[in-house]
Structures are given as C-alpha cells and as structure tokens.
Amino acid sequence: MDETRLERLEQILDAVHQTVIRLEHDHGAKLEALFDGYDLSNQRLDKIENHLGRLDSGQKEIKIDIRDIKRTTSLLTSIAQDHESRLQSVEPS
C-alpha cells in the first residue's frame, strides 16, 4: 500500500510540475508581449516628446521674430513720424 501511495504522490507531483512548467511558459510569453508593448509605448512617447521639443523651439523662434518685427515696426513708425514732422515744418502754411 505504501508503494501505491508513493506512486500516487509521484503522479500528483508530476502533474503539479507539468502545470508549473505550462504556467511559466504561458505567462512568460504574455509578459514578453507586455514588455514589448511597454517598449513600443516608450518609443512613441519619446518621438512625441522630441516633436514637441521641436515645436517649442520653433515657437520660441517665432516669438523672437515677432519681437524683432515689433521693434522694427516701432522704429519705422518713429522715423515716419519724424519725417512727417519735418515735412510739416518745411511746407508753407
């Protein structure tokens, strides 16, 4: 009877062992797929961050250009006003 019981325990142990192997294999594949998805998501986020960085850089350049245009416009307005006042002082009344 001890031998039958020992055989039964060996069968149960073998079944448990097979189940563990199957679970490790199945879950390993699933974990690998999850990590691949995680890596792809990180790559996409990196691309988005780089793109946003370029947009921010372009926006800063545009702001600088606008600031330069405003200065130039202000200078031209001042010169035009100066010329206008000179013309008025030269024109006969």
Image: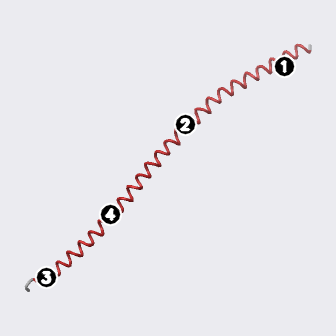
Distance, label 4 to label 1, CA atoms, is 83 Å
Distance, label 3 to label 1, CA atoms, is 115 Å
Whichever of labels 3 and 4 marks the residue nearer the N terminus, that label is 4
Amino acid carrying label 4: it is: Ile
Circle 3 crowding by C-alpha within 10 Å: few under 14, some 14–19, many from 20: few
Q: Farthest residue in the left direction?
A: 92
Q: Residue at x 22, y 75 (%)?
A: 79
**Marks 4 & 1, CB-CB < 8 Å contact:** no
Q: Residue at x 59, y 36 (%)?
A: 35
For disc 3, the marked residue is 88
**Marks 2 & 4, CB-CB < 8 Å contact:** no
Whichever of labels 4 and 1 marks the residue nearer the N terminus, that label is 1
Distance, label 2 to label 4, CA atoms, is 43 Å
**Marks 3 & 4, CB-CB < 8 Å contact:** no
Circle 4 crowding by C-alpha within 10 Å: few under 14, some 14–19, many from 20: few
Q: Which mark is residue 66?
A: 4
Q: Nearer the viewer, mark 4 or mark 1?
A: 4
On the rendered structure, is 1 left or right of 81? Answer: right
Q: Which mark is residue 9?
A: 1
> What secondary structure is found at the residue carrying circle 3?
helix
Q: Residue at x 30, y 68 (%)?
A: 70
* Percent position of residue 53, x then y: 44, 52
Amino acid carrying label 1: it is: Leu
For disc 2, the marked residue is 37
Query: In the rendered view, would you say 47 is above or below 56?
Result: above
Amino acid carrying label 3: it is: Gln
On the rendered structure, is 59 left or right of 71? Answer: right
